[in-house]
Image (tube, rainbow, N blue to C red):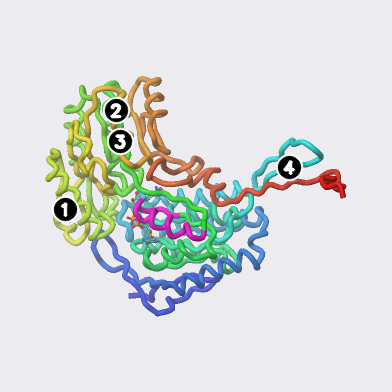
C-alpha cells in the first residue's frame, strides 16, 4: 500500500501526532484502498490555532474580495483539470455510479466559480435615518469556521462549505467523513496549488468523536457548519452552545413525494424511482415516502415494482451500473435491520428486501431496491424514521387535505414534491408543505444558485446561493456622524 495520506495544517502536509492511521475501503469490494492519518485532539487544536492566526494576524481577515475570487477561480480550474480522477476516486470510495460522481465534480467546480463571482458583487445596505447620521451595514467574515461533513456526496458536500466560507473571507478547519476522505484530500491539494496562504484552509481527517468534538467545542472556532445525522447535529449544537458559536445544520429527512391521479403517469413513476433510488437512497432529500391517491394506488405500485426490479445494481465503476453499494458494512446492516422492522410491523414487501450476493457482488455492501406498501398506516417506524438507503415506503390518501397532513407528519422537513396536472392544486400543496426544498412535477433537481436546507428537525440555516454566502458572514452596522459637534445631552 502507498504511503498514508496526511493532514493539511498551516500549509503543511503532516502525519497525525501519534502517527496513527485508519483504513478507507471501497464499498463495492470491501477492499482497503488507502490509509489515512487519524487526526487527534492535539492535531485539531493545532489546525484551529493555525486558522485563528491566519484570520487574526496574517491579513486574510482583511483580504480583498477580488484576490479571494482569483484564488477560488484557480481552485475551480485545478479541480476541473483533475475532474476524471476526482470522479473515479469518489466512485471507488463511496460506491456511487460514475455518472453521478462526474455530475458531482462538475457541481463542485461550479460552486467555486459561483462564489468567486458572488463575493465581488454589491453587498450591504445604507439607510435614510434622522439627524445628521449616515447609517449603513456591511458584511464581514465570521472568523474561524469548523466544517464537519457526511459521506454521501464526498466532494460536493465539502466544496459547498469551503467555497462560500473562503469567499466570504473566513479561515477554516474541515473534517470530512472518515468513510470518504479521499476526494477531500485531493481538494486540499488543489487549494494548496491555487495558492491560498498557510493556515487559511486546514484539513484534519479522523473520528467525529475526537476531531469533530474538538471543532464543536473549541473556543477559537466562531462557526460550525455541519452536515450529517440529526442526532449528531443535536450533540454538536449542545457542545457549541457553551461558546455561542454560529451554527448551520444540514440534517436528516424523510421526504414526501405526493402523486395525484391526474398526474402524468409515466413521469410520476419515473421520478418516484429516481427520488428514492438515486445515489442508493443515501440522499438526505430522498423521496423516501411516496403518497399515492387512492384511485391509482395498485396500478402505480405495479408499474413501480416492474421498473424497480430492472434497476442495474453493481460496482459504480462499471458504466452499466445504475445503483451502487451502500457505504459500509455497518450501514448496510442498519438498512437491512429496517427492512426486518418493516416486515415485523406488517408492511407489505413488494420487491427487494435482501442483500445482493450474486457473482461479483458478494464482497460488497449491495442491497436490492426495496419497496414496502403500508396503505393507511402512518405510525410505523419505517414510515417515520430515516433509513438512508434504497427503501421506499408507499402510503395511500383520499383527499388533498389528507395528503398534506401525511406529508407533514414526521419530525423532518427537508424536502418534498407533488405530481399533478392541476397547477393551482400543486401550488396549494407546496405552500402548505413544511419543507425547505420542494418540487412540482419533478424530484431532485437542485442548483447552486438556490438555498438548500430544512424546516423542523432537518436543520438550521441554509447553504448555497446568496443565503448560503450570508451564512458565512456577520452583519455590522456603521453610523457616521456628518455634523461633528458635542451632543449637548448633559447641561454641564
Ligand atoms: P453522522 O452524523 O454520523 O456523521 C456526520 C459527520 O459528523 C461525520 O464527519 C462524523 O465523523 C461527524 N461526527 C460524528 N459524531 C460527532 C460528534 N460527536 N461531534 C462532532 N462530529 C461528529 O452522519 P451519517 O449518519 O454518517 O450521515 C447520514 C446523515 O447525514 C443522514 O441523516 C442524512 O440525512 C444526513 N445528511 C444531510 C444532508 C443535508 O443537506 N441536510 C446532506 C447529506 C446527509
Quadrant including the N terminus: bottom left
Q: What distance separates the C-alpha of mark 3 from that of mark 4? A: 45 Å
Residue 237 part of the magenta segment: yes
Disc 4 designates what residue?
Answer: 135
The vertical placement of 89 against 114, above or below, is below
Q: Identify the element where label 3 is drawn.
A: loop
Tag shown at residue 310: none
Pointer 2 local density, CA inside 10 Å: few below 14, some 14–19, many at least 20: many
Pointer 3 local density, CA inside 10 Å: few below 14, some 14–19, many at least 20: some
| Residue 311 or residue 440, whichever sits in front | 440
The vertical placement of 187 against 302, above or below, is below
Residue 4 appears left or right of 331: right
Q: Earlier in the sequence, mark 2 or mark 3?
A: 2
Q: What distance separates the C-alpha of mark 3 from that of mark 1? A: 30 Å
Disc 1 designates what residue?
Answer: 355
Q: What distance separates the C-alpha of mark 2 from that of mark 4? A: 48 Å
Q: Earlier in the sequence, mark 4 or mark 1?
A: 4
Disc 2 designates what residue?
Answer: 403
Disc 3 designates what residue?
Answer: 409
Position of residue 405 measured from the top left corner of the image (x, y, whole percent): 31, 30
Q: Earlier in the sequence, mark 3 or mark 1?
A: 1
Mark 3 and mark 1 in contact? Answer it, CB < 8 Å. Answer: no
The vertical placement of 397 against 388, above or below, is above
Q: Which residues are magenta?
A: 226-243
Q: What distance separates the C-alpha of mark 2 from that of mark 3? A: 10 Å
Mark 1 and mark 2 in contact? Answer it, CB < 8 Å. Answer: no
Mark 2 and mark 3 in contact? Answer it, CB < 8 Å. Answer: no
Quarter of image, res 304:
top left
Amino acid at each position: 500500500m502507498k504511503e498514508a495520506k496526511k493532514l493539511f495544517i498551516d500549509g503543511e502536509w503532516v502525519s497525525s501526532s501519534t502517527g496513527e492511521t485508519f483504513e478507507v475501503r471501497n464499498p463495492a469490494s470491501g477492499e482497503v484502498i488507502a490509509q489515512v492519518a487519524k487526526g487527534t485532539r492535539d492535531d485539531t487544536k493545532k489546525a484551529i490555532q493555525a486558522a485563528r492566526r491566519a484570520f487574526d494576524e496574517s491579513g486574510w481577515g482583511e483580504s480583498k474580495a477580488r484576490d479571494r475570487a482569483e484564488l477560488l477561480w484557480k481552485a475551480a480550474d485545478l479541480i476541473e483539470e483533475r475532474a476524471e480522477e476526482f470522479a473515479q476516486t469518489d466512485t471507488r470510495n463511496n460506491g456511487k455510479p460514475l455518472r453521478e460522481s462526474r455530475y458531482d465534480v462538475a457541481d463542485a467546480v461550479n460552486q467555486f466559480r459561483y462564489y468567486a463571482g458572488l463575493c465581488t458583487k454589491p453587498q450591504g445596505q445604507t439607510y435614510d435615518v434622522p439627524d445628521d447620521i449616515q447609517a449603513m451595514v456591511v458584511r464581514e467574515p465570521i472568523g474561524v469556521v469548523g466544517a464537519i461533513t457526511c459521506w454521501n456526496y464526498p466532494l460536493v458536500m465539502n466544496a459547498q462549505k469551503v467555497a462560500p466560507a473562503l469567499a466570504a473571507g473566513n479561515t477554516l478547519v474541515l473534517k470530512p467523513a472518515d468513510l470518504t476522505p479521499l476526494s477531500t484530500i485531493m481538494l486540499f491539494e488543489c487549494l494548496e496549488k491555487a495558492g491560498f496562504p498557510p493556515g487559511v484552509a486546514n484539513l484534519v481527517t479522523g473520528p467525529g468523536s475526537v476531531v469533530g468534538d474538538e471543532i464543536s467545542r473549541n473556543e477559537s472556532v466562531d462557526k460550525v457548519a455541519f452536515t450529517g445525522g440529526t442526532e449528531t447535529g443535536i450533540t454538536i449544537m449542545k457542545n457549541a452552545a457553551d461558546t455561542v458559536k454560529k451554527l448551520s445544520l444540514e440534517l436528516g429527512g424523510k421526504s414526501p413525494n405526493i402523486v395525484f391521479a391526474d398526474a402524468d403517469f409515466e413521469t410520476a413513476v419515473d421520478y418516484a424511482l429516481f427520488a428514492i433510488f438515486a445515489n442508493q437512497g443515501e440522499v438526505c432529500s430522498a423521496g423516501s415516502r411516496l403518497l399515492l391517491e387512492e384511485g391509482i394506488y395498485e396500478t402505480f405500485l405495479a408499474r413501480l415494482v416492474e421498473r424497480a426490479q430492472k434497476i442495474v445494481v453493481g460496482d459504480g465503476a462499471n458504466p452499466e451500473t445504475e445503483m451502487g453499494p451502500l457505504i459500509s458494512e455497518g450501514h448496510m446492516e442498519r438498512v437491512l435491520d429496517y427492512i426486518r422492522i418493516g416486515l415485523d410491523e406488517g408492511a407489505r414487501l413488494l420487491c427487494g428486501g435482501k442483500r445482493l450476493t450474486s457473482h461479483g457482488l458478494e464482497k460488497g455492501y449491495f442491497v436490492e431496491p426495496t419497496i414496502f406498501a403500508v396503505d393507511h398506516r402512518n405510525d410505523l417506524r419505517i414510515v417515520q424514521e430515516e433509513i438512508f438507503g434504497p427503501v421506499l415506503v408507499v402510503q395511500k390518501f383520499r383527499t388533498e387535505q389528507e395528503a398534506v397532513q401525511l406529508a407533514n407528519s414526521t419530525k423532518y422537513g427537508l424536502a418534498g414534491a407533488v405530481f399533478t396536472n392541476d397547477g393551482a392544486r400543486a401550488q396549494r400543496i407546496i405552500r402548505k408543505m413544511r419543507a425547505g426544498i420542494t418540487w412540482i412535477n419533478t424530484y431532485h433537481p437542485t442548483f447552486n444558485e438556490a438555498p438548500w436546507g430544512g424546516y423542523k428537525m432537518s436543520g438550521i440555516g441554509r447553504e448555497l446561493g446568496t443565503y448560503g454566502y450570508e451564512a458565512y458572514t456577520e452583519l455590522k452596522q456603521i453610523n457616521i456622524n456628518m455634523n461633528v459637534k458635542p451632543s449637548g445631552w448633559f447641561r454641564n
